[in-house]
Structure formats: structure tokens, C-alpha cells
Amino acid sequence: MSINPEETAEMAAFLQPTKVIESDHPAVVACAERVTAGCGSDKDKIVKLFYFVRDAIKYNLFMISACEEDFRASMILEWGRGYCVQKAVLFAALSRAVGVPCRLAYAKIRNHRVPEHIVKMIGTNVFPRHGYNQFYCGGKWLSATAAFDADLCAKNGLPAVEFDGLTDAILPEKTLEGGPYIEYLEKYPATADLAFDWIVPIIRERFGADKRPAHSR
């Protein structure tokens, strides 16, 4: 990890484990080390971890939960599925486990390709608490969104996000056919830990106060 001495204090919070960003959990550490084995730079590490989180951890909106326990990185890793915020938490834990500073970022987005049954269920195609990641690499912060796995994108005719570790990789504006896909309506400040108390009211409003992951979906 290449960080100037004066940046050490500022970066410390983005390297520490938390209750949910379990970068010191044995399973998380083992996974991070396995995925990044042979990597010679921070850039190589975050690229390898990006594709692991994007594709090995399947996107599933129904894993959303109103319980903070269900956002723990070790649980998401064990389940092998999660929605955007859960996947971002795991990504942050894996990144920190191999010494790359990472923070959680949030945005309000409109997804023009949300399935009709989802729109009917939640009443909108706007998601006010979309979660993704930002990494400190090469002297700057980079954004990367590992939410939607490649299989899901292929099944729905959508472009998968690609990440080279040099430039931002966020959800595309257009579909493969050029139609509208993702609209970023607002971006919010990044945080060192999961902003659960800020996220959970929306979850409870849309899915119910007792919402827990639906492992059968």
C-alpha cells in the first residue's frame, strides 16, 4: 500500500474493521488473500476483488434486510449473494483485509430496467440508497460498482460494469441497445462504516420493519 506519511491518519478509518466491515474475520481474510494471491500492486488487488465480488457474489434484491446483522461481510460471503449495499460491505472488508483503503459510497439512482414486478412491489424504479465502493489507489479515490453480476446482466441484455483499477466504474447510463438504463439522481458523502441508521428507514418503509433475507429467492 502506497500512502504518504501525512495521509496515514486520514486513511486509518478506511483500513479498520467494523461491526459489519469484518476485514479481520478469518473467512474474509482467507478469501481476500486467496483472490489476490500473486498480485503485485494495489491496483491488481482491487481489480481481482472487484470481479470476485461482482460475479461470485450474486446480486439478489430479496436479500435486503432491516437487521444490521445481515450486513456483516462474513455472512454475505457465506451466503454468496446480496444486494448492492451488502455486496459493497463485503467488497470493503476484502479490500481492507489486503491493505487497500476503502470506503462506502451511496447514491440515489433511477433504474429504467427494473422488472415490472419489482416496480409494483416497491412502487417506484428509484432507489435512494444504492451502495458502491471507493478505493484509494494510485494517489486518488476510485469508484467501483460491483452490484450486478455478469450472469444477471447477460440474462437481461444489460452491460456489465468493467473495472481496470485506473478509472471509475459505475453503472452505465445506456443498455446494450442504447436505451436508458441507470440515472444517477444524487450522490451522497462516503462513509468509513455502513450508514445503517440512514439506510434502514427506507428498507422498513418499502419492505416492512421485520424484513430479513429471503434465501429461497
Image (cartoon, rainbow, N blue to C red):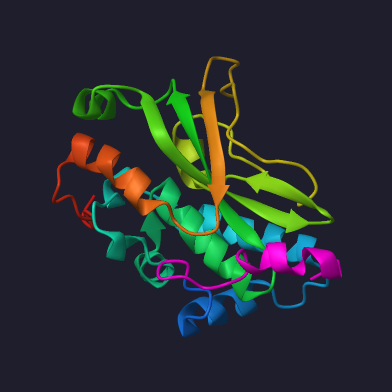
Residue furthest out toward the bottom = 26
Residue found 27% across the figure and 46% down from its top: 62
Is 108 situated above or below 216? above
Residue 163 within the segment the image draws in magenta: no
Name which residue lies at 42% across and 51% down. Answer: 195
Residue 5 place in picture, x, y as percent? 84, 70
Quarter holding the N terminus is bottom right
Residue 180 can be seen in this image: yes
Q: Nearer the viewer, residue 38 or 84?
A: 84
Whether residue 119 is situated above or below residue 6 in the rendered picture = above
Quarter location, residue 16? bottom right
Residue 179, quarter of picture? top right
* Residue 2 shows in this picture: no
Magenta stretch: helix, strand or loop mostly: loop
Q: Is residue 73 above or below residue 82?
A: below
Please tell me which residue lies in front, 174 or 176.
174
Q: How many marks?
A: 0
| Residue stretch in magenta | 1-21
On screen, residue 53 versus residue 152, left or right, reads: right
Q: Between residue 204 and residue 41, name the one nearer to us.
A: 204
Query: From the viewer's perspective, is 46 left or right of 83?
Result: right
Q: Which residue is at the far top?
A: 179
**Image quadrant assignment for residue 155:** top left
**Residue 132 % position (x, y):** 54, 46
Please give the name of the residue rendered at 47% of the width and 67% of the height, measured from the top-left corner: 21
Residue 85, image x, y percentages: 43, 49
From the top left corner, tell me how far across and down residue 157 is, in percent.
Answer: 50, 29
211 vs 203, left or right, is: left
